[in-house]
Amino acid sequence: MTDLNKLTIAEAREGLRKKQFSATELTQAFLKAIEAGNTALNAYVLPTPELALRQAKESDKRLASGEARALEGLPLGNKDLFCTYDQRTTASSKILDDFKPTYESTVGANLWDAGAVMLGKLNCDEFAMGSSNETSAFGPVVNPWRRKGKDGARARDKLVPGGSSGGSSAAVAADLCLAATATDTGGSIRQPAALTGTVGIKPTYGRCSRWGIVAFASSLDQAGPLAKTVRDAAIMLKAMASHDPKDSTSVDTPVPDYEAALGRGLKGLRVGVPREYRVEGMSKEIDKLWQDGIAWLKAAGATIHDISLPHTKYALPAYYIVAPAEASSNLARYDGVRYGLRVPGKDLIGTYEATRGAGFGKEVRRRILIGTYVLSAGYYDAYYLKAQKVRTLIKRDFDEAWTSVDVVLTPTTPTPAFAFGEKLGDPIAMYLEDIFTVTVNMAGLPGISVPAGLSAQGTPLGLQLIGKPFDEATLFRAALAIEDAAGRFPVPERWWEGDGKTQKKTPEKAPAKKPAKKAAVKKTGAKAAARPKTGSRKK
Amino acid sequence: MQVDEATVKRIARLARIKITEEEAKGLVKELSGILSWVEQLDEVDTSAVEPMTRVVPIELKKRADVVTDGDIADDIVKNAPMVEDHYFVVPKVVE
């Protein structure tokens, strides 16, 4: 009965059906794991144990009476970008304050209607703007993975779990949930998946409803799952996807049984390898990973083809016009009047300015200002329209590729997980994290990241597969072939369990600081005040 | 593209975001950096290209022009920072 939290969705589903354990026992195992590990990892910003146990009890009834639904009794984490009925939803921003939605996101409703259990709300970059989870008003999430030191032991420096879905990726990797919801605007599912050894898929734009998800860039945002295995991701996406009359961009097309499609093998699959992704200065280990992926797909029956996607290098700069422009428009709604934080000013405009100045973090303010600038009078054509035209060219590149290949294989990220603060001071260095993922959002295509190897530092690396519109099924098949060949990548050392006690026992080179006291002192600083413990931001 | 401090302040005003003098100085550098970086798009000839407006060609669904919800005033003001009856309260805007 121990370690129920280490199961996959497929295993837990079988265990529940065979009555090896109850949904309540399974849920309790996760609640215990969250209690033990969340202080160190900061993955959950709001655990919801009461709700979880209530849902689990209902699941146990249904399991007993033979009325189990697709995800009956399976405990999941929910990114705090998804609105949850009567449960605080913040987008990891101070500006939403104690916002408690009076409705549930469609994706969330689909999951709970399928019987899933919500363990809590997961940390993310503020308004999903970031690639390291360091822009969250709740403070950064810690990657469960640690670098290997020179002596072979794991180093102590904290690594980022990727972003923006860093709470989701860390929670899945650390077994604090079976799987999690996430969103991807420029790479926010796939990059965290790669950095934590988990599987993440951004489906085709329109596959999942965006209704009830805090908006960032509406023409790019798309929900998807982060999971431990390809099969689990397939099970999750099937439940999350739907046509929704409340989102006119969601597409009215049947959602296939992705899990059933997994068995079909790769015989005859044509895999494209785009030469433009071989960027200058690409590290040897990323190149080797890519070659391994090619070899594995070949061995599984696929054929490999060199292709060209000539406008690849323009995707990222075009993204940094389109995304901030749409964000500046979407985030205009946070005015201190209808919901969230209000900071009074001398008049109405003063109140808007004071509220938004205090409520938005640095990166969000930066992107709103860029967006406001590129949309301001006289600049619309030169920036936004130009970027949208470049987007057409990026999409055409792929349309051309689909005449000769079925999927495209690339690395997910240019580097493995980096340390806290390493890229925070340089916006463009941080933006480059998404260099391989962002084209997929610009073209509206589905993309999956699957763990495929370890870096020289012993941390995970991911491969990305890009597919034709609405052909997620083929992505799952190809990803499974990589997973079968590469194996899974569980975190080797579970240091976060037991509240960091193991950390204190081992001697350290630097003078040991008492974690509890340090946190207390830090809170007095204005900056540190924005980084409180789980569940509360300082206003 | 280089932006100056006056431009940054004008943009912040348009975006209704209060920034300090110090922040304005920092933003001059950051915004100029990002705007210069996106200038590489000028290399691309887009004279004969239509802007992308949607990622998949779908026909927008239409529905009957009828009221589908309502009577949820409590819900609508539930999260407002200042409310009187069912009204949002804001600082005086008309003398």
Image: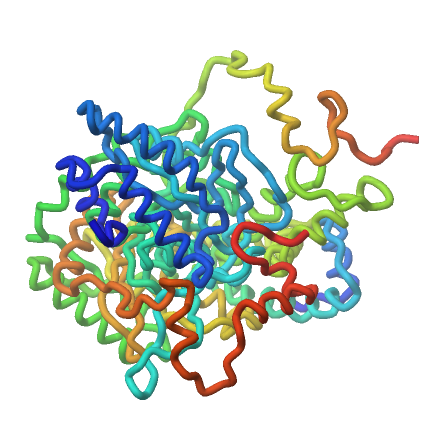
Left or right: A490 in relation to B65: left
Instruction: Give how far across and how far down residue A159 sits, in percent.
Output: 42, 70
Residue at screen point 29% across, 51% down: A227
Left or right: A87 in relation to A353: left
Any part of residue A434 in sight = no
Any part of residue A474 in sight = yes
- In front here: A300 or A42? A42
- In front here: A101 or A22? A22
- Badge count: 0
Residue at screen point 58% across, 56% down: A137
Name which quarter of the figure residue B55 lies in. Answer: top left
Name which quarter of the figure residue A3 lies in. Answer: bottom left
Instruction: Give how far across and how far down residue A172 sits, in percent.
Output: 33, 54
Instruction: Give how far across and how far down residue A433 sits, in percent.
Output: 43, 66
Q: Pick out the residue farthest to the right.
A: B95
- In front here: A245 or A277? A245
Residue at screen point 36% across, 65% down: A144
Residue at screen point 74% across, 21% down: B85
Left or right: A508 in relation to B69: left
- In front here: A71 or B71? A71
Vertical relation: A276 (above or below) A401: below
Colour setting: rainbow
Instruction: Give how far across and how far down residue A326 sits, in percent.
Output: 56, 46
